[in-house]
Image: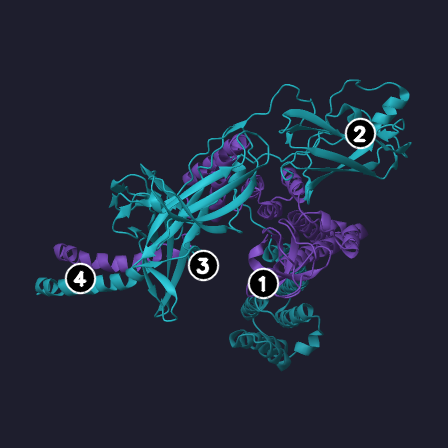
Chain colours: A cyan, B purple
Amino acid sequence: MSGRLVERIRPMHCGAGAAIALLTVVPQLPAQPRISLSVNVDEAYVNEAFLVTIQIENFNTCEPPTFPPLENCSVRQQEGIGESTQTLIINGRMTVTRTRTYTYEVIPHEPGPLTLPPIKVVVDGRTIQTERLRIPVRPSQTGELLFVEITCGRQKIYAGQRVRLGLTIWVKPPVVEGYRLGPRDILSMQLLQAINFGPFPTENVQTQALQRTAPDGSTATYYSYSTWTDYVPDRPGRLSFDDIEVGMTYPTRLSRDIFGRIEVTAHRRLRARPKPLDIDVLPLPTAGRPPNFTGAVGVFDITVSAEPTTVRVGDPITLTIEIRGDGAIEALPPPDLAGDSRLSGQFRVPQEELAGQVIGSRKRFTQVIRAETTDVTEIPSIEYAYFDPESERYCVAKSEPIPIHVLPAAQLDASALSEAVGTPLRPSAPDLRPLDVLRANETRESVLLTAVKPVNLSALAVVVGAPAAGFLLGWAFTEYARRGGEVRRRRQAALRAAQARLERAVRLPPRDAAAEVAAAMLTYLSERLGQPAARFAGRDGVMFLQGRQVPSEVCRHWEHIMSGCEQASYAGVLDGDISRLIQEARQCLRALSRYNL
Amino acid sequence: MSARSFAIQPVNVCFAVAVLVPVVAPPSVAAERTMSPQRQREVLRQALNDFDQAVSLAATEPQRASELYSRAAAGFTALIESGLRSAGLEYNLGNTYLRLGQLGRAIVHYRRALLLDPSNDKIRANLEYARRQVEPYIPDTGAARLAQTLLFVHYNTSLRGRFVACALCSIGGWLLLALRLRFAHRVLTTGGLAGIVAGLWLAASIWWQVRADENYPPAVVVDQEVILRAGRGEGYEPALRQPMGPGVELRVLQTRGDWAEVRLPNGITGWLPLSAIERV
């Protein structure tokens, strides 16, 4: 019977168990992270961008994916990372789902099949990857529709020389179903995108419609969009702007919205980069280069002012140096004040490089110097060496000397003292003052990977409150021990005194012994409670004990002993009876000593 | 009988799973720190290498150096987001942002580092180095300077240092009073009371600073050329003629929508876009 019952119940048990397990387990398990890869086109065109999207769902932490390099393709990550969080509360149970999206713009440069390999992403500490994806890439005519040119008014430029550069975007007018968009329409509909204009500004773009030769040799009307900038090449070599990129949403189908405005309903994403310029940036010549040349290219003039001009030795003098000219003012290097022996020989000059401030067509540098002796009578002229690219030679601009009056220092410093006594500590000692530079990174892993707990108010409360609480506890314990000890002492003394009287009663005649036993009992209560013995005589003693919640057995025992003693005093008693009475009195006292009275 | 008991085992297993899994399985939200120690070391070494490589390339290949600095910053940030509150990481992140030219963010991270390790000279030096590049320089008010002079212990010592001193004074003071219960001596009474008073003063100083940081959190301008306005909106007149560059330090008085009312060190108040500042 038992076997059949077990066999019948088993499937039911299994089902119920599984259901309970699922109900209990499933909501607790975190949802598994998911990753997907998608593109926004079915087929791509050469030099036309398409978007690749990587979407990660159900994660706690996620490291950015590493997009693998694709052959014959340019890949650029779109700015911004899409992230959304969805919170669901069902039956009081909250589920949070996070989704993060990374978008990349891919531009294929060669026709043929394009394979996007699996892309790995580290999600919640483990690596998962996307599926492989194939897209066909077809040839296109992008070069005729959109191209970019960079123009320069000079054939020869030097590194550091400011030159005027022009960027022109040429767009073949879009004609859709007989309707031709104008050059302004393209701007107003934001069809052109400055993906990377490099040094060129995106404002003040000049627009024209011109006849010109297309890259394929044919002549056609093109819209031109031109912008200009002052550019300073920072190194010699071929002038290159490979990173400049222009995008265009080239319309292939147009329609009108309910307000009659034209909108693009189908388009191609075009991308164009400028051709390399046939201009070499020349290095600055080394012949004739002044030793204090710091890299300024152009034509400059220098003026210097000082404040205050009457100081004590060691007091700060603020030098304001202004350089104006037609070179690259923003990137203008400061004059080498510390390297100027005429200045640093008389003044203490900081080593740090000056930042400078551009004010209109001039750049202002401020430096604090300190006169070292009272012999100094002027701030010597400050020299500023520069390379003039027009005359192709080095020149030096000079400021006027500034007369100053230096008084003795109020207190001599160590160096002044050594000079005064004529025994310099180290005549040719190098400058051992630390330079004001950025300190290096912390590299000790034990320091970097150790988390620090900040101070919080809870810890403060513990620090302030715990010792006080500890003191109060200690004080309370001490007080309790003191008071409890007094009570205990009196209780033990009373018991000892009563027992001593009982011991004495053993040796007395029976009649006297009974009186001694009664006296011992009364003495016990009297000494323990510090009250007169007469208060506990007779029936009063029993009532007192009952009032102090002493058990009734002990009270009856007390009453029995006291009445026995009274009876023996008046009527006499045998030796055996008085011995039993003394024994009972001992037991009663021991019982009483266990209770708080 | 034993065979029948064995036959019921799947049910037992189901019940055991039902009972044990909710207890044993970690809650999904508790998985904030998912980076293993090994992975943390790898990310740290990569970030440090990127930083060193960027420094060596900064003069010749600034573009490449900038990319490497950004990668180093991403690495340090990932470590901090994995739950590592470390002064060293914040300091390195400050260095990275400073090299990237993001002065405001550099000061934010230096100040966070200083909160965690106030006695670190390197952090103080680089913070001062960064502060010297801030435009405009906004000095403290006279009252603030006077308060800093009078309450030098409060202003010139670290929170953690005061916390340790508070603990020592409090414990020592009460200990002396406890000894006073046993040995009646005037020195014990005086010393105990002095320790307790000093501990309470330090506790009040810590409490005041923590509450001030909670109610009026310190922040730093991270955007370029931000205009301090008289109200919360671009239409309000500027409250300060000069725009504030990155790195200007201030306190946030309140936030409303996308704007924050702030107080500058010189006492001037005004409104800034919330996106232009970052809290320390």
Query: Do the CB atoms of the residues marked 1 and 2 lie less than 8 Å apart?
Result: no
Label 1: few (<14), some (14–19) or many (≥20) C-alpha neighbours in 10 Å: some
Badge 2 sits on which subunit? A
Query: Which residue was labeled with disc 4?
Result: A14
Q: Amino acid at mark 1?
A: Trp
Same-chain status of marks 1 and 2: no
Determine which of the numbered discs, if any, sits on residue A381 in the image: 2
| Mark toward the viewer: 1 or 4 | 1
**Disc on res. B259:** 1
Q: Residue at x 72, y 47 (%)?
A: B156
Chain of the residue under label 1: B
Gap between marks 3 and 1 measured at Cα: 31 Å
What's the distance in space between the residues labelled 3 and 2, CA to CA? 56 Å
Label located before the other in sequence (3 or 2)? 3
Mark 4 Cα-neighbour bin, 10 Å: few <14, some 14–19, many ≥20: some
Q: Check chain identity for marks 4 and 3: say if they share one.
A: yes
Amino acid identity at mark 3? Ser
Residue A154 sits above or below residue B225 on the image? above
Q: Are marks 2 and 4 on the same chain?
A: yes
Query: On the image, which quarter does residue A511 sit in?
Result: bottom right
- Give the amino acid type for the residue marked by disc 2 in the picture: Ser
Real-space CA distance between mark 1 and mark 4, rounded to the nearest whole angstrom: 60 Å
- Mark 2: give few (<14), some (14-19) or many (20+) Cα within 10 Å: some
**Residue at mark 4: chain:** A
Q: Tell me the CA gap for discs 2 and 4.
A: 100 Å
Residue to which mark 3 is pinned: A188
SS for dot 1: strand
In this rendering, do the residues under marks 1 and 4 share a single chain?
A: no
